Amino acid sequence: GAVVSQHPSRVICKSGTSVKIECRSLDFQATTMFWYRQFPKQSLMLMATSNEGSKATYEQGVEKDKFLINHASLTLSTLTVTSAHPEDSSFYICSASRGEGEQYFGPGTRLTVT
Amino acid sequence: AQSVTQLGSHVSVSEGALVLLRCNYSSSVPPYLFWYVQYPNQGLQLLLKYTSAATLVKGINGFEAEFKKSETSFHLTKPSAHMSDAAEYFCAVRGAAGNKLTFGGGTRVLVKP
């Protein structure tokens, strides 16, 4: 149990466009979902924490207007990168928690902005 | 506040040799500690976790870690490395009352035949 999926696994978009990444908990209800960003050969950096039905809490330095997070249901959270630029190219990973504190990670989404 | 330091960004071991990955943490509250493995272009898989029960924690794939409060350490070991152990390993800490994870910088393991 505790499977988390992400879609798409890879996406290439042009500079200035927006791209949406979905994170789904497949076999449990996720009270909290987390979005991370990972640059090549680096660790995971938490971008934001979202609870179902409420606004996301963003980490310091993360632009909330650029990285829009929606957590509309207990099984789905979306991250939209608005007006993407090449420096937004990264590996985005989500995780989901069902309230006991443990996080279950998705397989990640590789975003390339050209 | 909490933080994690992983000593050594790269570790190279021979197949069959001991794997030792070092992790030191700081936390203002009793910590929950985790080790994750990441294969290329994939998410994180939980290897093991410490949640204040036994100080020696056994995980998947033959890995284990020992929580040493006096040394604020949670080093990961495996007695005999296998080629499939080549991956990136992350140590993480979470405060008991919170749910945010703080990750170390990661250690890339290379296994030589």
Image (cartoon, grey):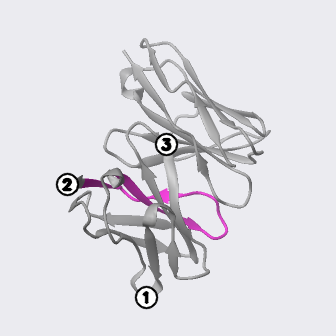
Question: Could you tell me what secondary structure mostly forms the magenta stretch?
Answer: strand
Q: Nearer the viewer, residue B52 or A20?
A: B52
Q: Nearer the viewer, mark 2 or mark 1?
A: 2
* Local SS, label 3: loop
Question: How far apart, in angstroms, are the residues tagged by discs 2 and 1?
Answer: 34 Å
Q: Earlier in the sequence, mark 1 or mark 3?
A: 3
Q: Specify start and end residues of the magenta stretch as a single range.
A: B87-110
The residue at 31%/62% (across/down) is B81
Mark 2 and 1 residues: CB-CB less than 8 Å, in contact? no
On the image, numbered disc 3 is attached to which residue? B43
Q: For the residue labelled by badge 1, is the local secondary structure a helix, a strand or a loop?
A: helix
The chain carrying label 1 is B
Q: Quadrant of the C terminus of chain A?
A: top left
Horizontal arrangement in the rendering, residue B79 relative to residue B30 (left or right):
left
Q: Amino acid at mark 2?
A: Lys
Q: Nearer the viewer, residue B100 or B1?
A: B100
Tag 2 subunit: B
- Spot the residue most to the bottom: B70
Q: Earlier in the sequence, mark 2 or mark 1?
A: 1
Q: Tell me the residue that label 1 is attached to.
A: B70
* Among the 4 quarters of the image, the one containing residue B63: bottom left
Q: Position of residue B59 (x, y in %)?
A: 51, 66
* Disc ID at residue B112: 2
Q: Residues within 10 Å of mark 2 (few under 14, many from 20)?
A: some
Q: CA distance from mark 1 to mark 3?
A: 32 Å
Q: Are marks 3 and 2 in contact (CB under 8 Å)?
A: no
Front of the two marks 1 and 3: 3
Residue B42: % across, % down:
45, 39
Quick check: is B94 in the magenta stretch? yes
- Image position of A100 (left or right of A19): right
